[in-house]
Amino acid sequence: MRKFLILLFISTFTVPTSFAAPARKAAPRSYKGPVVSAPSTVKNSPLKQQMNQALALARSGQYEQASNSLFQLARRAELQAERPQLKYVLGLMLMEMKLNQVAAFQFVDVIRMGNNKYVKQAIEKLSIVADSLGDDTLLNYAVSKVDLNDFPEDKRDMLYFRIGEIKLKAREFPKAAELFSKVSARSRYYNQALFNRGLAELEGNQLDIASQIFQSLLAARDSAPVTDTNRVSAQIALARTLYQKQDWEGAIEAYSQIPRDHFLWHDSLFESSWAMLRAARFRSVLSNFHSLHSSYYEDFYIPESLLLRSIVYLYICKYDEMEKVLSLFESTYGPIRARIGDFIRANSDAMEYFSEIERGQQIKKSNKALSLRLPYNVVKSISEEGNVKRSLFYIKRLNDEKARIDLNPGYRSTPAGQYALKVINNRSRNAKLAVGDMTKAHLLNMRVELRDLYEQAGFIRYEMINGKKENLKMKLAGKDLTAAQIDDKIDRTFYVQNGYEYYPFQGEYWLDEIGNYHYLGKQSCE
């Protein structure tokens, strides 16, 4: 979960992985694998005939019939010596049927058997199906068995990329950057690998290298639309790099290039507010907060933003506004904190936590008022965490495989079909339990975060009381300030030239739309 300290900004970011690889093309309906036949070691002629028939079905592209025959043959005790071949070809058939999870189990079995001529091919195929599923467990297992020298050259880019991801998660940043740099420019993984390399360099504090990488990505996407996610991700990553370099003005300018109609704009607006605070651009910060705290973004979980807003008011001695914001923080996030605590105390089963996330996903898709025991903004925030999002994608892939089997009742009733459903159901349940555990961990972190933020709110309120006391002393001494408007010396032409409409009035701010608020408050400090 992203954490922002109120007076000290954490300089590491969780960058969204948005350079998605293009969808894999459907395989042609003719088997292109190795031509295999029943080995001569099978002395029982009926079994040898059955193997030949099954392999002939495989070669002719009759994947369903072949998979069912191979599945049953692989369970025969008399064919133990031939089991690696049968399992491997069965996995190939299931891949052709787009049942990647079930296929993965066959390749894992072949690898575990060891000492057979199909191990290397099984590792290669397992890597491919694990990549398609996005299953970290399978990927880690496949990678642990891989010898790059044995891997086909045309598949190595995928392997470099996936091993790089594992190293990045393990915080082995130099090794991750090295692996990402090996992905060739012609690979479909290239843009994502380049982005991840920049992230690894950023996390490793190689800021100049990271900046160059993100700038090269931006240059490569220069002709893309301004809302292109690859382009926007590179732009926000560059802004974060500049922030980490403490180039506040450069970071502010980079953040300003994020288009308002992109889903990353809200994040960029909040992060740019920190840069503006560090650059002492208080009026600009408050302009941002009018957008961040508008009703349009009421579903976002950003408690620290209210405390940051109160600090800005403290800097300009706007104690009345500061009181309003602190009260808003307490009235908004106090109930949220209580509901999180109640939910954690009432539920110990991981499936209950997953069910809450699942209901939140249904609300997002259907926009119907379904009952949630947790606040929607909390569920939404957790659903967008990297590990949860990846696991939800994996569950969706499993649901897609189950739907393919359900839509084919003829195959569903076969022994292979029943086995496939059992595998998918078990993996789906385990994945849901894993999401439940992740959700509980994020809720526990949220509860701790809110406790810390409440403590900071208390310190801020103490500073507010001290400020009010000093202000009162000044008034009693006859040194109170005149009510001067910050923009008194700027006339209407300034706003017109900058694309604003101008309506003179007495108030704190004016607007024409989200993201275009302009603060006109009064400065109250001496």
Image: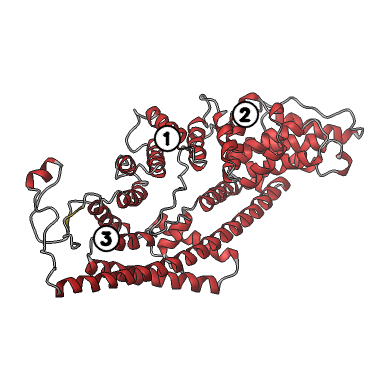
Q: Which residue is mark 2?
A: 156
Name the quadrant containing residue 257. top left
* Image vertical order of residue 153 relative to residue 370, above or below: above
Residue 441 % position (x, y): 55, 61
Residue drawn at x 64%, y 56% is: 430
**Where is residue 39 drawn, in percent x and y?**
85, 29
Q: Is residue 129 left or right of residue 225?
A: right
Pick the front one: 496 or 102: 496
Q: Are marks 2 and 3 in contact (CB under 8 Å)?
A: no
Q: Secondary structure at mark 2?
A: helix
Residue occupied by mark 1: 211
Residue at left 39%, top 38%? Answer: 238
Q: Residues at badges 3 and 1 in contact (C-beta under 8 Å)?
A: no
Characterize the local packing of mark 3: few (<14), some (14-19) or many (20 or more) Cα atoms within 10 angstroms.
some
Q: Amino acid at mark 2?
A: Arg
Q: Which label's residue is closer to the chain start, 3 or 1? A: 1
Q: Amino acid at mark 3?
A: Tyr
Gap in Å between the C-alphas at discs 2 and 1? 27 Å
- Considering depth in this image, is 393 or 302 the residue closer to the camera? 302
Distance from Cα at disc 2 to Cα at disc 3: 55 Å
In the image shown, does 196 or 248 lie closer to the viewer? 248
Residue that numbered label 3 is attached to: 315
In this picture, is 226 found above or below 431?
A: above
Image quadrant in which the C terminus is located: bottom left
Instruction: Report whether 297 appears left or right of 126.
Output: left
Q: Helix or strand or loop: what does disc 3 sit on?
A: helix
